[in-house]
Image (tube, coloured by chain):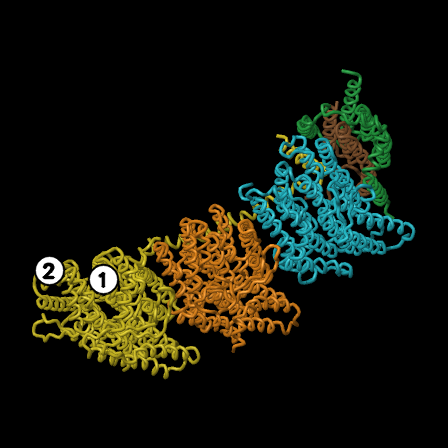
Amino acid sequence: MNTAMHLEFTSQLDYLWALMPEAVLATGALILLLYDGFFGGDSSDNRAVGWGSMVIIALAAVANVWLMGVEEVGDTGMVALDGFRTFTNFIFLAAGALIVLISFDYNRREDIKDAEYYALLLFALVGMMILAGSRDLILIFLGFELMSLAVYVLVGFNRKDPRSSEASLKYFLLGAFASAFLLYGMALLVGSAGTTNIGLMGVMLNAESAELLTVMALALLAIGFGFKVSAVPFHVWTPDAYEGAPTPVTAFLGAAIKGAAFAAFIRIFVLGLGDFHAQWEAIIWWFAALTMIVPNLIALVQNNIKRLLAYSSIAHAGYLLVALIAANTSGMASFLFYLIAYTAMIVGAFAIVLVLAGRGDRYQQLSDYDGLGWSRPWAAALLALFLVSLAGLPPTAGFVGKFYILRAAVEAGYLNLAILLVLTTLVSYWYYLRVIVNMYMKPSAEAREGVAWAASLRTVLAVCAIITVLMGIFPSWPLLKARQSVAGLRQATEQVVETDPLTRR
Amino acid sequence: MVTEALILSGLLFTIGAAGVLIRRNAIVMFMCIELMLNAVNLSFIAISRQVGVSAQLFVIFVMTVAAAEAAVGLAIIISIFRHYSSVDVRNFRLLRW
Amino acid sequence: MSFLNDLYSGPWIVTFLVFFPGIAGLACLFIPRGWLKRFAFSAGLIEFLVSLPMFWTFGIGRIEYQNYVSIPWIPDWGISYAIGVDGISILLFLLTTFLLPISVLVSWEQIDKRERAYYAMLLVLVTGILGVFVALDLFLFYVFWEVMLVPMYFLIGVWGHERRIYAAVKFFLFTAFGSLLMLVAILVLFWLHLDQFGVASMAYPAMLRLDIPGGLEFWLFVAFALAFAIKVPMFPFHTWLPDAHVEAPTAGSVILAAVLLKMGVYGFLRFAIPLFPNAALDPRVVMTMLVLGLIGITYAAWVAAMQPNLKKLIAYTSVAHLGFVMVGTFAFTGTSVAGGVLQMVNHGVSTGALFILAGFLYQRRHTYEIAQYGGLAKVIPVFCFALVLTALASIGLPGLNGFVGEFLILVGSFLRYPWVTLVAATGVIFAAYYMLPMIRRVVWNDLTVEENRSLIDLSRLELAIIVPLLLMMVLMGVYPKPFIDRVAASANWLSERVELTIQADTADDALAAAEVLERSPRTP
Amino acid sequence: MDFTQLIFYVAAGLAVVSSLLMITRKNPVFSAMFLIVALFSIATIFVLLGAHFLAALQVIVYAGAIMVLFLFVIMLLNLGHDFEPDIRGRLGWAFMGGLGLVLFAEILTAVQGAPGDAGGDVLTPWFEAKGVVAGVAEPLFRDYAVAVEITGVLLLVAMVGAVVIARREA
Amino acid sequence: MVGPPVVPALVALAQEAAQSAEAAHQAAYVPFLPSWMILLPFLGFLFNGAVGFFAPQQRKLVSVVGPGVLGLAALIAVVNLVMLAGVHDAEAVIRSYFVWIDIGQLRIDAALQLDQLSILMAVVVTVVSFIIHVYSIGYMGADPGYARYFSYLNLFVFFMLVLVLAANFPIMFIGWEGVGLCSYLLIGFWFTQGEKAEAGQKAFVVNRIGDFGFLMAMFALYAYLGTLDFHTVFEMAPRAFEYGGAAVTLITLFLFLGCTGKSAQIPLYVWLPDAMDGPTPVSALIHAATMVTAGVYLVARSGVLFALAPISMNVVAVIGAVTALFAGTIAVMQFDIKRVIAYSTISQLGYMFLAVGVGAFTAGIFHLGTHAFFKALLFMASGAVIHAMHHALEHAGEPAGEDMTQDMRNMGGLRSHLPTTFKTAWVAALALAGVFPFAGFFSKDEIIWSAGAAGQTVLWAIGIATALLTAGYITRWLVMVFHGENRMGREVRGYLHEAPLVMTGALVVLAIGSVVTGWVNIPEALPLLPEFTWLHGFLHPSFEAAEHILVEHLGEPAHAAPVGGGEGVWAIISTVAALAVIVIVFNALRAKKYRPAAEAVEPSGPAGLLYHKYYVDEVYETLILRPFRGICRFSWRVIDQVVIDGVAVNGTAYATRFFGWIVSRLQTGQVGTYALIVVLGVLVFLGFVTL
């Protein structure tokens, strides 16, 4: 790696190099489509395509490893080449792989044969990676839409199920609606900055005397991203989409998509527009506060496990928003760490929900989980583990992640948000506990047919559980990696928080 | 004229947004969104006078995206119509609370 | 024996003791059902026997942490696995290991469903508790503090009585409420350390050197104090306790009362007061805490006197007893602090025994209603003997353990707060007022309930459970000196050191004072 | 008021009126028609603002392709009649209208800070130098080639997605 | 820092005191097996307790071991007394066995202090206990809890000896509470009867109020002096405390609060009459002879402190005198054979407090000793009567509840059936009435005289009045029980018979004691008698310091009664008056026809007031207990369940959930609503930045 390749972005070919993992994925997805078109025929199973996509993801990961050795020269390239990007790429790829693995079972059970499922998953990954790795508004927009379009379709992929279609429609309509706002914000931003390059905006705009137009643009931009990361009050689509979507896609929505949106959010707001911290802080503060409070409250009255996890996922977006507003190294590193932990636990949780729901996703009510702890001890124990981790109790990854976010918040002086975070966490304990109560403390529900635990699914669960526990007990290495990945990203952001953290809000 | 165009863009954007709120027909709502996108395009065009051609390039991508969205969106609408025999969003309330 | 000496003066014995129950607990999940009980008990017994020599190898009169070990855990955040015992923790530590085999044994006959998970939870719980008592790193402390919540939650919620779910959730949320705010405070401390010394550290000794701005110090103290006050529990944060106690299975109640509550006071002694001396010993704060302690003593006694439910009564007596301890803690003389620690151990033994005895009754009659009993001395005299003795120990009859702690607390508190002590001492009267009627209605009186005629007296197993506790009560009452000796030096040191920190006006002086009195964590 | 401005206001008025009509007509087909009118008006303004190429695109892509697609779907689903009361009641109208006014007011406030015509015109010299099509194409394929590539993927996704999701269940 | 700091100078004092304590070790008196004195009863307790657990039917061994250990202990005590009496002004010997509590400055040894006062008390305790143990063999012979009974009794003596022999306050407190515990256990010995168990509980709780005072006194003493050892405390006190100062006054008042509880003085006397529910030997031992006198012992022991606090002395004297009179009047109208004596005990204890309150410590201890004998005798005589009544009623097949066996209205004319009991009861009564030459005459006379000599005219007068009252009620008691017509059925009467030998033997021994114990201290003032102030001389070292302080501040006691006349004159007057009262009452009552309790009408008017004990229990119940229970109930039902748990805790939870529900209603599932929410959000946030 010492002989690092340097990219200067003097020609468009450089971008191809810089987008190597994305290119691998996209090409792979295309090949898969072609393969399916020519050889797939009427095969009753789309598993071959699934394994193919696993291979492609692995190749993309290799490409990403290669990317780690590439350095960029100059700082205005449309595509970033930094630790942040490779780190998030890895997480997205890993999440994608996990989702592919849990999809096998689901697709067979729900009789979903279209190979396009996996191709779209890969395309969504491409979109996410572009989204998280770009520095240009156009690329961000395109990545955004690429990801969204693929996911709109994925959400509605279970065509037999009206819930799936409904979820897809709601997601699509509101997503497009929010895109318009985002785009309007971009327009105004371009108008006031005169450039589409995020890196240059800080130079072009004077943060000290920011015009109303810029502030407005920032607000619209924040709203657009707020929609994607489901920040309250733009979260309204989330529970419906999560509940209706095929469960693997729900996991994908919860883990990777939100992560990608957040990565872009952070890249634009912290890295690109960190100088405008004072301008966007108020908005994000309210986002964070509301996004912690509202979903945690609503989740208390949920009876559908998927919906409950959906609200839980919104609440986690709130916690991540705290990391975002902290806008310091800790904040970004904690985001990366949290992303790993969160991906592991949310995918794990949904994987169990997926299996237990049975054919046609019938068993999704909390009451269906009664007594599960004793009739299906492993499933229940794992679900309990993931829930405990989501709740942020030690010794799980969720705790360390939350701790890191809190640390970032305290360092940046957002004691009020830190306190709000822990209080809402307290509320969240309540509904996570409800699931555990049902599983362990209530008499068993009536017996139902056994479920098959495919090897792929068991692998996913094992991986998620190990990550959840190991990162809870020995978080050093990922913490180090997370910190290294954001080290030196942007010195200026450190100045934002230089003042005494305890005298500010 | 740029300012006027921007104001017009804002007005159209607002009308589009209001349309989304007012209508209950999924297709018409989607059309309203298209109008909003077009309003944004108008903004881009207006500001490209000062910013340069890159803002116009943006419009090209927006248009492409809008086309892609239209394809996917209408497909979704067709798909849901199969279930509900309706495109009235009031009927789509299996998922709530 | 030099091998033993080396072992017990070395750093790893405590680590072993902390994690052994947890590992054994996980092993429980895979033990054949037939072996399970014996396995769990053996694990508990081994734990206790291994821990027992610590009582003698503990260096009396030494104030530094013994069996100290500190190895980096999360170096990036300055977090290390740092543990050690001193006079404040050693007795609580040993109390926990002492009660472990007993609570396992108690469960032998009372738990008849989902046994594997039960013993696993019980043992894991003990790991959490032991960890709390030895952790010398704030992060580690917090981890253990929370880790212990989950198994306790399961113990109450799965193996409890009718309203177990309510009680379990209440317990969990209530205690988590306090600890989460403490987490924020810990992070602020962490940040302050980073700010003042440029080094990330969570080490407890390092935190003692911090120079915390006045207003902030108060709020940090409040955050810590809230967590601990809930755990103690102090009035008005006590209402989770009766519910948790009543619904928990016997062993759960025993651990809860005997050890878990102590974590609160321990937290005050180890963290809340030494870390924030100026806030904690601000006269207004002290008065508030003392008054709350006094309310705990009197009010809980009054409420206890009215309880128709045996377990609930005992639960409220815990609140009253812990009120005493809190008074001793915040009077903050060496004597009262030592008395407080001692009283915690005493309370652990006697209240633990009370819960066990209540459990024995429950096993026979499946009710905790006091009105359902009466005249038991005629049918089950041995049981009644144990109950009366325990009750007397609990109300602080001289010659039994309860008195010594109470006496030291009050005698120590009187030096500073005579009026507070005056009120606190009325607790002595109220103690008789709630406990004796219970005894009368259970043990004495006429045998009115027909079912009670056929009760059988304590079995051998039950005797094996209760006799060690009774012996401890008598031993600690008649010859408390060895126990006091182990606490005294640390208690005195603590109170002196904190006083000195307060007296030292400027930051420099405070640092100097801290430096002078700093316990260098060295391994002997 | 010179001629360009006159055209601008006419086109703007047309755009506003037709979009208002679009959101108020009960029949979706009418709505689509009015939207097309609005898009044409906007294309006119594009021309006035110097974006000739994009004006052409606007007509071709939007009016020509997208709106046809809309109409096609409306017809396909047999929604071309106006008895379906898909518009909110009077009260909803007023409320939503009010919200729209507020939104407009906010946008207006912000837009007033924009440089406007005073910001100069870099576009006219550029197009004069490069030509209308090349002026757009050159930066598009030079500086944003990668974006174009991505757009290709995007369109592929849209195509695949539309096919998959609209496909009748076997 | 609030509160009295321990002055460094006091540390020097403490060292000095320690040196003199060392000197005490070199005194000529070498205690004889002091630890065995207290260990023996304890071993007896263990043994009998074990028997009670494992072989409750075993009686023989218990009958030997129970009284046996006491006999040995008494022997040791007497030997020690003799040895001590042989050494002139022997210094106190402190035997320390192990360190009980040691922390910081506080060091409490498990130590015994052997000096004149404690040994004398030990002798009284062990001797009386031994006799009562023997008596119990007969009295409790048929009880199923025989071994348990003896184990309790042994334990009681153990604690009593700890109390008496302790060398510091905390160890004394162990004994102090320990005897309370045994009292509790023994009162409730027949626990299956609800009111007995309740009486025991009442005794315990009331005593705890007193103990609270004791504790506070200890804390204050430690705060001021830094030690709780008797020796050091009394050594340092005169220098550490200002005469009449607030500190020492408060300390002594707290101590006295403890005494009022244990020794049944106003206002805490209420438990003692109820304590009569226990077996009669228990009443004799604990509630007459030993435990209840612990308060007097404590005041005498802490004489130095009390001497320094004139206000406290006055309080002690006044409370004592008032209690004496008050309880005496109640005794006049009681019909329960034991209650009369119980109130009499309270009254006599009042006398003792009067004595120590006016500084006549020796007189107080003297009366304590004599009282132990004659009051124990009175109780045991009652016991014999009850025993007889019980047997007779049982044999006759009639209900033998306590209302039958103990109500004097059912008795009368028992002298022919219970001759020995009758005779010994008369001896005891005369002793109680203070008739020459019975023991009570000497001790009571000295108390009254001391009160007069101290210039307490009113108290002196009360003392005399009470003495006459005493003669009156005890004569009434005698008459109702033994004289006149037997008011039982003929059939029952036939079964009445004297108690067994162990019991009557014990009665006789005590009767002898009731006569001769008075002779240990014959004041010179009495005409015709040789002066023999052995007790004064013997106890002199124990009270020297206290008396020195008194003399220093109050001057020598006067040699004439407040209304003139010397000690001799008043002794004669009081004896004659008492005799006169006895004769008058005897004659007046012998002729009176009593109706059996079942047919009797309740007394009304002033007599009713006395009969109902001035309604004190009722007043306590109404004014203190009921409101207190109300507070308790309020605390639980309202504060705990409604305010804290209901509103604050569950209320928060419900509110949270409710808010959750409310907010969840926004998720209508309608895209229109969602769009509206989004737009509203946009508007708000844009407004946020634009405004």
Residue located 42% across and 63% down the image: C338
Q: Secondary structure at mark 2?
A: loop
From the image, state the color of chain C. Answer: orange
Residue C41 point in image, percent of width and height: 57, 72
Residue A467 point in image, percent of width and height: 69, 58
Above or below — where is A22 with respect to C471?
above
Instruction: Return the residue found at the far top.
Output: D1
Instruction: Return the residue found at the far right.
Output: A38
* Label 2, residues with CA under 10 Å away: few <14, some 14-19, many ≥20: some
Left or right: C66 with respect to C430? right
Instruction: Return the residue found at the far front.
Output: A3
Q: Quadrant of residue D59?
A: top right
Q: Quadrant of residue E186?
A: bottom left
User: Closer to the observer: label 1 or label 2?
Assistant: 1
From the image, state the color of chain B. Answer: brown
Residue marked by disc 2: E562
- Residue C19 got which mark? none
From the image, state the color of chain A. Answer: cyan
- Out of E82 and E501, give the one closest to the viewer: E82
Residue marked by disc 1: E238
Q: Chain of mark 2?
A: E
Q: Mark 1 or 2 closer to N-term? A: 1
Above or below — where is D79 with respect to E314?
above
From the image, state the color of chain E. Answer: yellow
Q: Is residue D81 visible?
A: yes
Amino acid type of the residue tagged 2 in the rendering? Pro
Q: Quadrant of residue A272?
A: top right
Residue B41 point in image, percent of width and height: 77, 31
Using the numbered discs, state the Cα–Cα distance from disc 1 to disc 2 in whole angstroms: 30 Å
